Amino acid sequence: MIVSLDDLYGFQNMVLDRWISEMELSSIKERIELGLPGAEADVLDPRRDGVHLKAVVRYEGFQGKSLLEQHRMVMDLFREELKGTLHALAVETIGTKTKEL
């Protein structure tokens, strides 16, 4: 069986569309906030295509970690999806500090 690149791309989009419909933005937010206790996350779909998503994560646990370590902490929460169904998740991390009175 010969499969064209167009067929593969169409299949990939079908899988991604199904994944986004099954795991909506609010579910992604919830997974981040449960996986990083105390974190606050906003999950956006800036291109409005359901594929290229962006997570902005505020978490005190990022303090003292490199940017790479911070991003890995978030991306590790989606290890299975990153093997195929999650096409693009941009991550912006913000370390928070407790204000002293």
Image: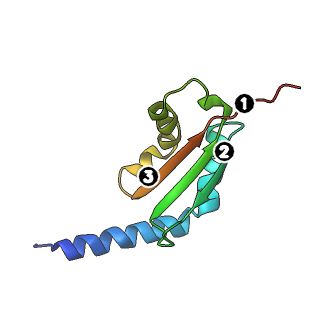
Residue shown at the point (39%, 59%) measured from the top left = 87
Which residue corresponds to mark 3?
81
Residue 8 placed where, x, y %? 24, 70
Select label 1 or label 2 by which is in front.
1
Q: Nearer the viewer, mark 1 or mark 3?
A: 1
- Residue pointed to by mark 1: 97
Which color scheme does this rendered protein use?
rainbow
Characterize the local packing of mark 2: few (<14), some (14-19) or many (20 or more) Cα atoms within 10 angstroms.
some
Q: Is label 2 or label 3 in front?
A: 2
Residue 75 screen position, x and y as percent: 48, 43
- Horizontal and vertical percent for residue 48? 51, 72
Q: Are marks 1 and 3 in contact (CB under 8 Å)?
A: no
- The Cα atoms of the two marked residues, 2 and 3, are separated by 17 Å
- Position of residue 94 in the picture relative to residue 75 (left or right): right
Instruction: Count residues near mark 3 (Cα–Cα under 10 Å), then give few for <14, some for 14-19, many for 20+.
Output: some
Q: Amino acid at mark 1?
A: Lys
Relative to 16, 64 lies left or right: right
Alpha carbon separation for disc pair 1 and 2 = 17 Å
